[in-house]
Image (cartoon, rainbow, N blue to C red):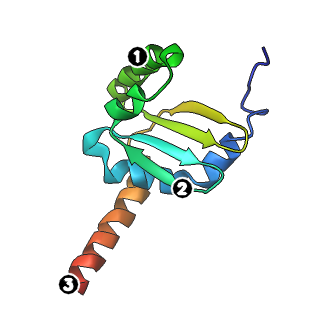
Amino acid sequence: MKKITADSDTYLPILREHWDALTGMYVAFEDRAPMLEFNVVTGQIRAYAAEDYLEELSDRTREETKKQYKKTVAEGALMVFVRDESKEILRSYIFALAKGSSTRARRQIRKKQRMTMNDE
C-alpha cells in the first residue's frame, strides 16, 4: 500500500485553493456540525447533515469514520470529504481550526447577509 504524504497528495493543494469557500460553507452551517464534501470534478462544495452522510458510507468505513467525526467535532476541527468521480475516489481530511481561523469567512457571510437585508 502506498503511503500518502502531504507532498504527494494531489488534493491538498486543491483544498488549500478553496479554503475560504470551504470554511465559509462550514461557518454557514456551523451550528449543525455539517459534513462537507468537495467535488474536484465540478468544484462544488456541499454541506450535509453528518449523520445522514456517514450512513451512506460503505460498511467497511462507516463506523471508523463516525468515531473520527465525533472526535473531530469535539476538538473543534473540520472534516472534509473529497470526491473525485474521475478516479472513483472518496477521501476524508481533518483540519484543525485555530481560534479565529474562519474569521474572514464569518465576516464575508455577515457582509452578504447585510447586503441581502438591505436589498429587501
Measuring from the top left, give residue 96's x and y in whole percent: 48, 33
Residue at (43%, 58%) from the top-left corner?
104
Determine the CA span between mark 3 and mark 2: 28 Å
Residue at the (72%, 44%) spot, across then down: 86
Between residue 72 and residue 91, name the one nearer to us: 91
Q: Residue farthest to the bottom?
A: 119
Given the image, on which type of amino acid does mark 1 rest?
A: Lys
User: In the image, what residue type sits under mark 3?
Assistant: Glu
Number of other residues with Cα within 10 Å of mark 2, as a class: few under 14, some 14 to 19, many 20 or more: few
Q: Residues within 10 Å of mark 1 (few under 14, many from 20)?
A: few
Which of these two is toward me, 13 or 101? 13
Which numbered disc flags the more N-terminal residue, 1 or 2? 2
Q: Which residue is mark 1?
A: 67
Task: Name the residue that disc number 3 marks.
Answer: 120
> At x 35% / y 29%, what residue is drawn?
73
Sequence-wise, which precedes: disc 3 or disc 2? 2
Residue behind mark 2: 44
Q: Position of residue 108 (x, y in %)?
A: 39, 65
Q: Residues within 10 Å of mark 3 (few under 14, many from 20)?
A: few
Going by the numbered disc 2, the residue's amino acid type is: Gln
Q: Earlier in the sequence, mark 1 or mark 3?
A: 1
Q: Horizontally, is 90 left or right of 109 in the view? A: right
Given residues 42 and 114, the one toward you in this image is 42
Q: What label sits on residue 96 in the rendered view?
A: none
Q: Is disc 3 in contact with disc 2, using a CB cutoff of under 8 Å?
A: no
Quarter-wise, where is residue 66 in the image? top left
